[in-house]
Amino acid sequence: MTIEATATTLQTALDGDRPVLIQFWAEWCAPCRAMIPIVDRFAAEHEDRVEVARVDIDAHPELAASYRVTAVPSFVVQQGDRVLDGFTGAMPPAAFAAQIDQALSR
């Protein structure tokens, strides 16, 4: 399941036991929209391993700024206060899953 994140809901997810995959996106961004079904499928298939949060950078610019997001789509994998990995850009499902698996193995 993917949560539409606000500062409060994102912090709640980060306070949990699982790592959090944060997707920064914008409605006007075609690559962002293309990644939504890929991220949602990943979230459904890995709900026991990782929490997934989606941040609309136009609705929550303060969150984008706090993560220094300069391009979308951007992704951050974080466990508690520790950022495990960050990457930017649209990619096919297999490459996306491999990127997340690599981050979670750190």
Image (tube, helix red, strand yellow):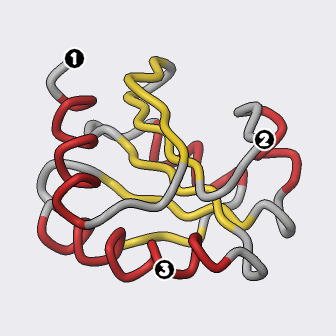
Q: Quadrant of the C terminus?
A: top left
Left or right relative to 83: residue 33: right
Residue ID at (12%, 69%): 45
Q: CA distance from mark 1 to mark 3?
A: 27 Å
Which residue is the site of mark 2? 70
Which residue is the site of mark 3? 34
Residue ID at (28%, 54%): 96
| SS for callout 1 | loop
Query: Residue 27 versus residue 55: which sits nearer the camera?
Result: 27
Q: Are marks 2 and 1 in contact (CB under 8 Å)?
A: no
Badge 1 density bin: few <14, some 14–19, many ≥20, Cα 10 Å: few
Left or right relative to 82: residue 98: left
Amino acid type for the residue under numbered disc 1: Arg
Q: CA distance from mark 2 to mark 1?
A: 24 Å
Q: Are marks 2 and 3 in contact (CB under 8 Å)?
A: no
Q: Are marks 1 and 3 in contact (CB under 8 Å)?
A: no
Pick whichever of labels 1 and 3 is earlier in the sequence: 3
| SS for callout 3 | helix
Q: Position of residue 105 (x, y in %)?
A: 15, 24
Image vertical order of residue 94 relative to residue 49, above or below: below
Amino acid type for the residue under numbered disc 2: Thr
Residue ID at (51%, 20%): 81
Badge 2 density bin: few <14, some 14–19, many ≥20, Cα 10 Å: few
For residue 106, the mark is: 1
Image vertical order of residue 46 relative to residue 14, above or below: below
Left or right relative to 27: residue 75: left
Image vertical order of residue 68 relative to residue 94, above or below: above
| Callout in the foreground (1, 3) | 3
Left or right relative to 30: residue 20: left
| SS for callout 2 | loop
